Image (tube, helix red, strand yellow):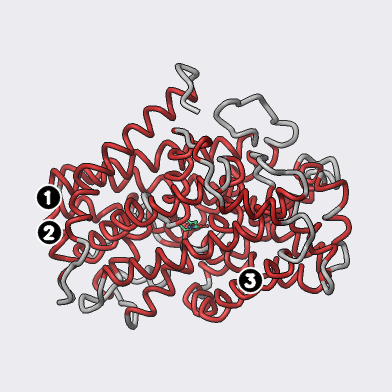
Amino acid sequence: MLMSGGTESERASFSGRIGFVIAAAASAVGLGNLWRFPYLTSHYGGGIFVVVYIIMALTFGFSLMAAEIAIGRKTGRSCTRAFRDLSEKHGWIGALAGIVPVLIVPYYCVIGGWVFKWFAESASGGLSVLASDGGGFWWDYITGGAEGLGDPFVWFGLFALMCTVCIAAGVEKGIEKMSKILMPALLAMIVIITAYELTLPGIWDGVAFYLNPDVSKLSMGTFLGATSQIFYSMSLAMGIMITYGSYMRKEDSIEKSVRNISMIDTVVAILAGLLIVPSAFMFGFGDSQSMGLMFVSLPQVFAQMPGGSIVAPVFYLMVLFAAMTSAISLLEAAVSGFVDRFGSGRRKSLAVSALVVAGLGALCILGFGPLMTDLAPFDQGAGWLGIFDTVTNSLLMPIVAILTCAFIGYVIKTEPIEDEVEACGNGFRSKGLFRIMIRYVCPICLLAILVFGLADMFGLFSVY
Ligand code: PHE
């Protein structure tokens, strides 16, 4: 996160609301929107998942993001210390939230490595390789069947190294500034490629699958998937928005900012879904639960597209950039978590974080090779990478979110947080919604989702 290198006393702020919104949106828009949202939508029945996701983003997502940013701005602290400042006895909630980025960033970098590979391959004339085998290349590649496991290691290493170097050199700020240009450019690319796709014969069944909600496909799983996706995509329940809030100026509106950030994040996700899900459907990956969705159908679209060999690398480059800004903010959160928690210097904390990324990232890659073990049903068919994804998104994040709601709703009460939102002098239009969500709806629903999810994982009873 930019500027967190300074000490608390010299804490800088964003230059204004727009600066704040862009920085937070750069953290939020990433692989969550482009990689995770489309494959979950495909897995959970298309349109119905999109509807549930939008409703939850506007209610759960909005309230939690407002709460986190307000906690950050009120205390002027990053996650670990913010909770302790508000209540001496509850610092552990912040510490728990601080663990999440440490567990996400390694596997995020593995997927970032795949994007890197897809960029490099398509840029060097290898689009047909990526599109080969009817989309089977991705699985061959990650399991080492195509080019050995050394290759995924190289691209993962490069991706992680670039993020580490950016933080070590303190250039995160410059990188996030580039988002001002590259985020709209990415959106424009998505729209152009989608417009082309819509001319393909056979695509419209896929569009109907994506946009037509089929209520018979609604299950507890839809809610579990959508909730985990909201946390992941909006960078919630891991302390990140608390830290961002700590750099926000008092006179800027939290409510408007949260509206903008969640709107940008949701629009990018929905457009990315429109880009990927119908084409995957058309190429026969319809309700595939595969994490590889983004890597299997798009190369085939590019292979048919006039000028596809140029469009493909440009597109993957932009995805790479979006992934990198998010990975940097995750890594930065892990680093400042170590600094806050153990009082270690930034350099040492960065070195430790990099080691954790290398170790756990290697575990994820080898989990598709020699360390492949049957970790079902917890791994979504993706070995150790799936385990990290499930443990963070379906377990730790709901727990942190429930604790955050309970903490605000019943320990410090919602008033101080509402006051913080109102501090800019513009009032708080959604105060009623916020209060009901934080005190009742979020904790109760999240608890139910968590319990059902766990019961299903352990095979106690199925809810899907
Ligand atoms: N929200 C990011 C994404 O959608 C992931 C992320 C989570 C980034 C948390 C930073 C912090 O890819």
Structural crowding at the residue carrying mark 1, measured as other residues with C-alpha within 10 Å and reported as few (<14), some (14–19) or many (≥20): some
- Contact, mark 1 vs mark 2 (Cβ under 8 Å): yes
Cα separation between marks 3 and 2: 42 Å
- Residue identified by numbered label 1: 413
Q: Which of pointers 3 and 2 lies earlier in the amino acid sequence?
A: 3
Reply above or below: 455 against 186.
Answer: above
Reply above or below: 307 against 50.
Answer: below
Give the residue displayed 56% in from the left and 77% down from the top: 184
Residue 135: x and y, percent?
Answer: 80, 48
Query: In the image, is 224 to the left or to the right of 278?
Result: left
Q: How many circles with numbers are drawn on the protein?
A: 3
Q: Secondary structure at mark 2?
A: helix
Q: Which mark is residue 191?
A: 3
Query: In the image, is 175 to the left or to the right of 153?
Result: left
Residue 250: x and y, percent?
Answer: 21, 75
Structural crowding at the residue carrying mark 3, measured as other residues with C-alpha within 10 Å and reported as few (<14), some (14–19) or many (≥20): some
Q: Residue furthest top?
A: 460
Residue 240: x and y, percent?
Answer: 38, 58
Query: In the image, is 128 to the left or to the right of 191?
Result: right
- Residue identified by numbered label 2: 416
Give the residue displayed 72% in from the left and 44% down from the top: 285
